[in-house]
Amino acid sequence: MPASSLGSGRLCATWAPRVSTRAHCRAARSLKLEYDAVVVGGGHNGLVAAAYLQKSGVNTVVLERRHVIGGAAVTEEIVPGFKFSRASYLLSLLRPQIYKDLELKKHGLKVYLRDPYSFTPMLEEGVGGKPPRSLLLGGDVAGSQRQIAQFSQKDAKVFPEYEAFMNRLVSAIDPLLDTSPIDTAAVRRGSPIQRLRSIMSLRPLLQAGLKLGTQLPQYYEVFTAPIAKILNHWFESEPLKSTLATDAVIGAMLSPYAPGSGYVLLHHVMGELEGKKGCWGYVEGGMGGVSHAIASAAASYGAEIFTEKQVDRILVDNSRKAQGVHLQDGTEVKSKLVLSNASPYTTFMKLTPQEQLPEDFIKRISQFNFKSPATKINVAVDRLPNFLAVPNTTDNKPLPHHQCSIHLNCEDMQLLHKAFEDANQGRPSDRPMMELCIPSSLDPTLAPPGCHVISIFVQYTPYVLTEGKKWDEQMKNSFADTVFDWIEKYAPGFKASVIARDILTPPDLERIFGLSGGNIFHGSMSLDQLYFARPVPGYSNYRAPVNGLYLCGSGAHPGGGVMGASGRNAALVALEDFKHL
């Protein structure tokens, strides 16, 4: 992927990406031709699945098509001396049970916690010689209230009540993330024991409803209503509402006025780090550090992990039973279990023989929504951005707002909606919504002294442009120029600080990381594609229509983010089946 520099307004050198040299697992000497289980794809969910399988005595191999493990949770040295979390860039959702079971700290996982966590500068003229206003939110509730009070005393007063309301919902649904949805096929056709076991799997769902009690109708509204409606009920100030709304639409081709956007917000606030609820952080060495720690745990149990081994077909016999995989180089690897970390579309429409899948299932998978709105731009800079709202100090050291998620073009929800409408009509947003993160503000291992790496997550950009046009280098650079022009308005001097940039549009995210449509969640997190219906109704418990084939990636329950739950849950289901083979 070309990376071009715009420093001082000139086009400079291009570098090929280089992989972080950090060892990720005990290298296997050679690929064997038979295992108990094959995991297709070395993304973090696939590695989690392999670790749980191998820990339970199931001889497991992971086959990754790229030259580096991690899928979208990867560190790459795109520019010499600069290490980027090239796709995913923040950690919070990784399940505490996985941390504990796999002893990830022992295997090298180190996280820098962020507090404060959100910074939204205003694009406005300062009053009376003062700088423009900004909104800084963090774990200090009183401090957040003082910030909010700049825009609304009423909102400042009610903010703790809103957070308590959302935290109660998070607490209620949290157990659902670690359990498999009900196996509806077993309820219809299984033995009495299988039926009973499946019905018992409804217990976490019923318990969640009981926890919410008399407020269940209000919480139902959070799941189904537009996030704009929910936030308008609580607050009056646009900067606060818009800042909160970004978490409801990030990674989703949704307007804040779209029904169901409330759940996406919930998905971004239900995390935990180091025992701190809702906390987000940067992984030391980049997001590849998560994948390397999980891989190290898997390898310590005896799992084998190979890169540059591309699976091009899942082997299925005439009795609709998975037999292993066929590699692009012609090698066949036999196994009793196959777990796919690929997206549902790739798994079932590209890798699985179509004649072995039910017609209705194929139709539903073909209609699975994986539209993506996101472009990721990775930037190497020679200094910190200097925001008009909070100017840098003379020593140019990182300030609290530099460690946050920095929200630009997020002063009001109409800006987000307009950006969505642009993309919905097939053109990149003229005034895109942006989330900037500067992980090197906390982690000095990522960039040379005085320099920094910046992740820019940009919305909205369509996969296919108007009139069927495709993204080419000219269009990509033109859009990146638009993004940089807007950043320049908030932080003059930004463009002159740029050493190099790496632009990943939805087609690039699909090509490089295997994200169908460029969707970071492997598929929309809309209500019609969650829980019982993820990826499709009747197949939400990780089992495919092919016996011995399981979906263990983000396209399965509970969905996307660097969570690991899909990998763990799928492995536990597969282990139960393996006992009866």
Image (cartoon, helix red, strand yellow):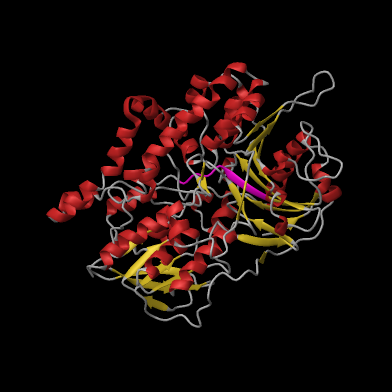
Q: Position of residue 39 (x, y in %)?
A: 42, 67
Quick check: 119 left or right of 496? left
Specify the quadrant that holds the C terminus. Answer: bottom left
Occupied quadrant, residue 21: bottom right
Q: Nearer the viewer, residue 439 or 454?
A: 439
Q: Position of residue 348 (x, y in %)?
A: 37, 58
Q: Is residue 303 above or below residue 145?
A: below
Q: Nearer the viewer, residue 509 or 92?
A: 92
Q: Nearer the viewer, residue 536 or 378?
A: 378
Q: Is residue 109 above or below residue 470?
A: below
Q: Is residue 170 visible?
A: yes
Q: Nearer the viewer, residue 154 or 576?
A: 154
Quick check: 302 left or right of 66? left
Which residue corresponds to the image point at 55% horizontal and 25% vertical from the top-left?
Answer: 159
Q: Is residue 70 visible?
A: no
Q: Which residues are magenta?
A: 370-377
Q: Is residue 116 above or below residue 365?
A: above
Occupied quadrant, residue 291: bottom right
Which residue corresponds to the image point at 48% horizontal and 62% vertical from the top-left?
Answer: 103
Which residue corresponds to the image point at 40% horizontal and 43% vertical from the top-left?
Answer: 174
Q: Position of residue 448 (x, y in %)?
A: 78, 58
Which residue corresponds to the image point at 37% horizontal and 74% vertical from the top-left?
Answer: 59
Specify the quadrant that holds the N terminus. Answer: bottom right
Q: Is residue 257 magenta?
A: no
Q: Position of residue 323 (x, y in %)?
A: 31, 72
The mark total stands at 0
